[in-house]
């Protein structure tokens, strides 16, 4: 544990968590029936306390977490714990193969599609776009979109994962 975390843990937080966030997190955690999702709420609260820059951690994470189903959390968690996660995060030409994720998690095509469409709606994931254009229409470059079969986690998605899946 870092020196700052140790100091905060022993003498209290330097900057209190705003009550509107605290009440939202605790209220949603208490209403949640799934133990796994309750753990994510606890992680969000814990990691929020030690975040270096709380200005970018706003109500958005609370709203996203409220709108995630168990399958969506399983998809994000599987990617977050994969051995190749740093390559996926920083190499803009790499993507997640949705069929492999679906098979690994034993999801039906419908369960997978519904989960992915919600992750896209929440801006946690996006269809894969290669940096180079797929083709040209005259002088206009045309990008191919991988849809739910080839996708990437967005910066917002990674920030959410850091807040709910990382245990400090």
Image (spheres, rainbow, N blue to C red):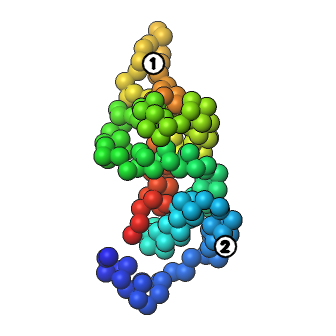
Residue 133 makes an appearance in the image: yes
Element at badge 1? strand
Circle nearer the N terminus (1, 2):
2
Q: Residue at x 43, y 38 (%)?
A: 104
Residue 139 makes an appearance in the image: no
Which quadrant of the rendered structure holds the N terminus?
bottom left
Q: Residue at x 57, y 62 (%)?
A: 35
* Contact flag, marks 1 and 2 (Cβ < 8 Å): no
Q: What separation in Å lies between label 1 and label 2 (alpha carbons)?
A: 48 Å
Most distant residue in the bottom direction: 11
118 vs 16: above or below:
above
Q: Residue at x 55, y 45 (%)?
A: 72
32 vs 133: above or below:
below
Label 1 neighbour load within 10 Å: few <14, some 14-19, many 20+: few
Residue 67 as seen in the image, left or right of residue 100: right
Which quadrant of the rendered structure holds the C terminus?
bottom left
Q: Residue 17 — which label? A: none
Tally of marks? 2
Q: Nearer the viewer, mark 1 or mark 2?
A: 2
Which percent across, then down, holds residue 155? 46, 48
Which percent across, then down, holds residue 153? 46, 42
In this rendered view, identify the residue nearer to me: 75 or 136: 75
Q: Residue at x 65, y 61 (%)?
A: 33
Label 2 neighbour load within 10 Å: few <14, some 14-19, many 20+: few
To which residue does mark 2 refer? 23
In this rendered view, identify the residue nearer to me: 23 or 140: 23
To which residue does mark 1 refer? 141
> Dividing the picture into quarters, in which one does residue 71 lie?
top right
Most distant residue in the front direction: 106
Which percent across, then down, holds residue 47? 46, 68
Which percent across, then down, holds residue 27? 68, 69
> Dividing the picture into quarters, in which one does residue 132 lie?
top left
């Amino acid at each position: 544990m870092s020196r700052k975390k140790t100091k905060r843990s022993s003498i209290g937080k330097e900057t209190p968590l705003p009550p509107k966030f605290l009440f939202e997190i605790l209220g949603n955690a208490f209403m949640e029936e799934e133990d796994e999702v309750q753990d994510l709420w606890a992680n969000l609260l814990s990691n929020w306390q030690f975040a270096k820059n709380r200005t970018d951690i706003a109500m958005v994470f609370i709203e996203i977490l409220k709108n995630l189903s168990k399958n969506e959390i399983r998809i994000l968690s599987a990617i977050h714990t994969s051995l190749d996660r740093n390559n996926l995060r920083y190499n803009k030409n790499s993507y997640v193969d949705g069929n492999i994720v679906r098979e690994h998690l034993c999801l039906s095509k419908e369960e997978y599609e519904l989960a992915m469409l919600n992750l896209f709606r929440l801006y946690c994931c996006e269809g894969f776009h290669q940096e180079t254009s797929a083709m040209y229409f005259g002088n206009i470059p045309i990008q191919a979109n991988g849809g739910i079969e080839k996708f990437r986690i967005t910066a917002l998605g990674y920030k959410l994962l850091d807040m709910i899946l990382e245990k400090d």
